[in-house]
Amino acid sequence: MKLRIVRALPEFLHALDLGKGHSLSDPDHRQWVEPVRATSGFERTTGRIDPDEEQFWLFRNRVVLVEEPSTVHLEEIEVAVKYEVLAQEKQFVEMKRDVELLEKGEALAGIAREPIPREVRVLVWRRDQGRCVTCGSVERLEFDHIIPLAKGGSNTERNIQVLCESCNRSKAAAI
């Protein structure tokens, strides 16, 4: 059995003519929960599935072509269709995340990021008494640039503070 996603569909899909005598109807939008199989002209005429004919399935607005379906049971095809579509969705989410990270990296590429000198870290730690300057937490502490390097800040004692991870993330790149 070979599976191939042949097209993505708009959300308003109710019925689809797939050619080769196949048609698909899903007025209840079941395809958002489980794969829906298109019926062929042969099946509509005879009431039987042609074991040698390729099958079209609809799942989550994607049409999946199943070639050589006679080699497996319908339940196996349903699971394979779900897996193929969900794997494609997962891959898309990962690609989108990777693109965002690459774009963020390109934006930061022009900034020469030097480590905070050890002496500055020691002075800031003593000054802030080893606590988050915002909430007073002593867990998951980080050194933070008050004025971000991306906005012209420096690695000096006056521009560094101790923040917990949570307060640092909520501050982000704001000044």
Image (cartoon, rainbow, N blue to C red):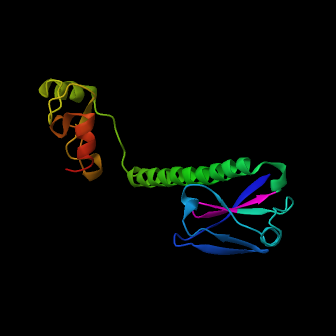
62 magenta-colored = yes
Residue lying at the far front of the rendered structure: 47
Where is residue 41, by image quadrant? Answer: bottom right
Q: Is residue 110 left or right of residue 127?
A: right
20 magenta-colored = no
Q: Main secondary structure of the magenta part?
A: strand
Q: Is residue 130 left or right of residue 44?
A: left
Q: Is residue 106 left or right of residue 123?
A: right
Instruction: Give the vertical position of 83 relative to 166 (above or below).
Output: below
Residue 54 x/y as whole percent: 80, 62
Where is residue 39, by image quadrant? Answer: bottom right
Residue lying at the far right of the rendered structure: 52
Q: How many numbered marks appear? A: 0
Q: Nearer the viewer, residue 97 or 2?
A: 2
Q: Nearer the viewer, residue 89 or 109?
A: 89
Q: Residue at x 74, y 51 (%)?
A: 74
Q: Residue at x 61, y 49 (%)?
A: 87
Instruction: Give the vertical position of 81 relative to 65 (above or below).
Output: above
Is residue 60 visible from the viewing direction of this image?
A: no
Is residue 1 visible from the viewing direction of this image?
A: yes
Residue 117 x/y as whole percent: 28, 30
Q: Residue at x 26, y 37 (%)?
A: 166
Residue 77 x/y as whole percent: 72, 51
Residue 102 x/y as whole percent: 47, 52
Instruction: Give the vertical position of 128 relative to 63 (above or below).
Output: above
Q: Residue at x 70, y 66 (%)?
A: 38
Residue numbers of the magenta segment: 57-67
Where is residue 36, by image quadrant? Answer: bottom right
